[in-house]
Amino acid sequence: MAMAAHAHSAGTSLARAEPLALYIHWPFCVSKCPYCDFNSHVRGNVDQDLWRAALLKDMGHEAALLPKRRIGSIFFGGGTPSLMPPATVAALVEAAEALWGFTPGIEITVEANPSSVEASRFADLGAAGVSRVSLGLQALDEQALAFLGRAHSVKEGLAALETAQQNFSRVSFDLIYALPGQSAESWAGELARALSFGTEHLSLYQLTIEPGTRFATLVAQGEMTPVDPDHGAELFELTREMTVAAGLPPYEVSNHAQPGCESRHNLTYWRYRDYSGIGPGAHGRRGGLATVRHRKPENWLNAVAHNGHGLQSEDRLLPAERAREALVMGLRLGEGVDLGDIARRSGVGRESLVNARQAQLLESHGLLSREGDHLTVTPSGMLLLDRILGELIEI
């Protein structure tokens, strides 16, 4: 027990020396997309002053619990955070700097939909301190956009991309592929066009049918047939071949970037470092605690008003839970994981982290690579990542 306590202390001191990531959730959208299972809500009216004050109060609570830390990245997610008034974004950025202080060259990202209304705010968001935008284009085909329930056209999306490139030093955009009926030739053409725009980062996601979404209902009713897994694998491999050739190799299962242009904020999650989450439904990991905010906007507001924060739960993670999360997140990355580092941070012995016999078997099949304590899933293994994680992780 003393050994585990010592390891936890070592892990905590390591964390304190590292930049902290801050996630801010804005839960509102103009409409709900049929594939989306994020914490997003459609509301006819939003009291902007009330929401700004509540987010600032929730942030202040986190800052009091995380003294002597510096913020290395801020991510405004949603929902549709580009619907936030730029003055609110500026107020939150200023408060974060005052409460914690920033590391040099801090990365501040806002997720945005490519509507002309939101694109018109890009200059003001840049002036508020935002340095990076993640644009939800989702498709470069009108039929695909209609299928995905998107409110913008291809023309409007590309105009928003151009505006983003004029106002932010760093730009990423999302595309969804493996849509029902999508051929390899069709996706290759769309991806080639996407790569021609010269953005430093692309997030390329296969369509997954999430429980509780409109698409899940359609599948259950037999009105929609998901892509065959073998065809999905073909599209996945094609995606990797094309992005590597274009100089945007995959650094995570679905994320591709020019070297040095990876999302620093998302790397914090995947490398299992501390991050603070505020706003409705936001999750956090700080000092071995798992934090969760109230999910429904009205419940979160009430909690902030009564308690001074929006926390619903704050649970101490056991060493085995921390180690497992670190493995599940880290093995998504092209760089893989260091078992010694996970052992030091979690307090779990490195020999207990993975099934050594299974690791050898996966390595013999070319699905895993191991050099000492360093473990990576190979490109071939990424196709079977969920299965590999289930077989490999012992704890």
Image: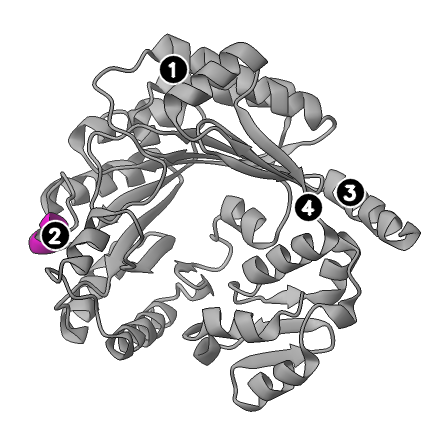
* Amino acid type at image mark 1: Ala
Mark before the other along the chain sequence, 4 or 3: 3
| Marks 3 and 2, how far apart at CA | 47 Å
Residue 341 picture location, percent across and down: 74, 60
Residue 75 picture location, percent across and down: 46, 36
Residue depicted at 68% across the width and 58% down the height: 323
First to last magenta residue range: 143-147
* Amino acid type at image mark 2: Phe
Residue depicted at 56% across the width and 75% down the height: 391
User: Tag on residue 317?
Assistant: 4
Residue 107 picture location, percent across and down: 51, 38
229 in magenta: no
Secondary structure category for the residue under label 2: helix
Residue 71 picture location, percent across and down: 61, 33
For disc 3, the neighbor class at 10 Å (few under 14, some 14 to 19, many from 20) is: some
* Amino acid type at image mark 4: Leu
> Residues at badges 1 and 2 in contact (C-beta under 8 Å)?
no
Secondary structure category for the residue under label 4: loop
